[in-house]
């Protein structure tokens, strides 16, 4: 399933396929968003769709991508419980600005089938407070 490109107002990368009486109908382009091609299992956006966090169960990697040139960095969090019940939380940041690829973190070995919580946030500077965060809990390692 191809996912819409993110950015201010969550605008889809699309091409007009038909205009009728001032009403345009859009169809997605083939290069709309490479997130599904990366094998992403779970993803979430900030509340304003200006950053995307993604989790890939194969290899237990997660990443974050800045989707809008607003001066903020994108921050992603991955949370899970180990097989012994220990709580873990890892993070990754994309401070490279908009238009780039995901910044990935794959330094973890999650228990197979463990539920993961994935959060996408924005942050003003390296030590600023997170804001416009959104969490998705559909993921499994």
Image (tube, grey):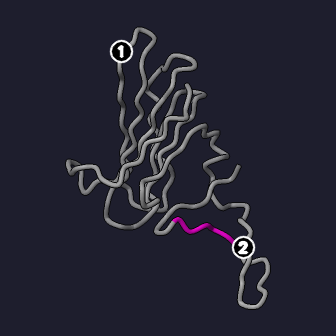
List x then y, in percent, for residue 5. Answer: 57, 61
Q: Horizontal and vertical percent for residue 129?
A: 22, 50
Query: Which span of residues is magenta-colored?
Result: 10-15
- Residue drawn at point x = 36 percent, y = 37 percent: 91
User: Dot 2 lies on which element?
Assistant: strand
Labels 2 and 1: the sequence-earlier one = 2
Q: What residue is disc 2 on?
A: 26
**The stretch drawn in magenta includes residue 14:** yes
Dividing the picture into quarters, in which one does residue 20 lie? bottom right
Left or right of residue 10, residue 93 in this image: left
Looking at the image, the residue that sits furthest to the top is: 84
- Which numbered marker is on residue 117? none
Q: Residues within 10 Å of mark 1 (few under 14, many from 20)?
A: few
- Give the residue drawn at x 21%, y 51%: 128
Residue at image position (60%, 28%) is: 58
Any mark on residue 86, and which? 1
Relative to 39, residue 28 above or below: below
* Contact between labelled residues 1 and 2, with CB atoms less than 8 Å apart: no
Instruction: Tell which residue pokes out farthest to the left in this image.
Output: 127
Image coordinates of residue 19 in percent, x first then y, are 77, 85
Callout 2: few (<14), some (14-19), or many (20+) C-alpha neighbours within 10 Å?
some
Considering every residue shown, the one lying at the far bottom of the view is 21
Does residue 119 show up magenta in the picture?
Answer: no
Quadrant hosting residue 79: top left
* Marks 2 and 1, how far apart at CA: 47 Å
């Amino acid at each position: 399933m191809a996912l819409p490109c993110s950015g201010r107002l969550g605008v889809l990368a699309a091409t007009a396929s038909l205009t009728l009486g001032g009403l345009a109908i859009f169809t997605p382009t083939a290069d709309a968003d490479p997130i599904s091609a990366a094998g992403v299992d779970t993803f979430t956006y900030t509340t304003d769709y200006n950053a995307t966090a993604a989790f890939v169960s194969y290899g237990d990697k997660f990443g974050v991508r800045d989707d809008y040139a607003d001066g903020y960095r994108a921050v992603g969090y991955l949370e899970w419980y180990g097989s012994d019940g220990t709580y873990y939380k890892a993070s990754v940041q994309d401070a490279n600005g908009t238009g780039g690829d995901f910044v990935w973190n794959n330094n973890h070995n999650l228990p197979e089938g463990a539920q993961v919580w994935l959060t996408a946030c924005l942050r003003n500077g390296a030590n600023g407070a997170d804001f416009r965060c959104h969490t998705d809990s559909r993921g499994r390692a």
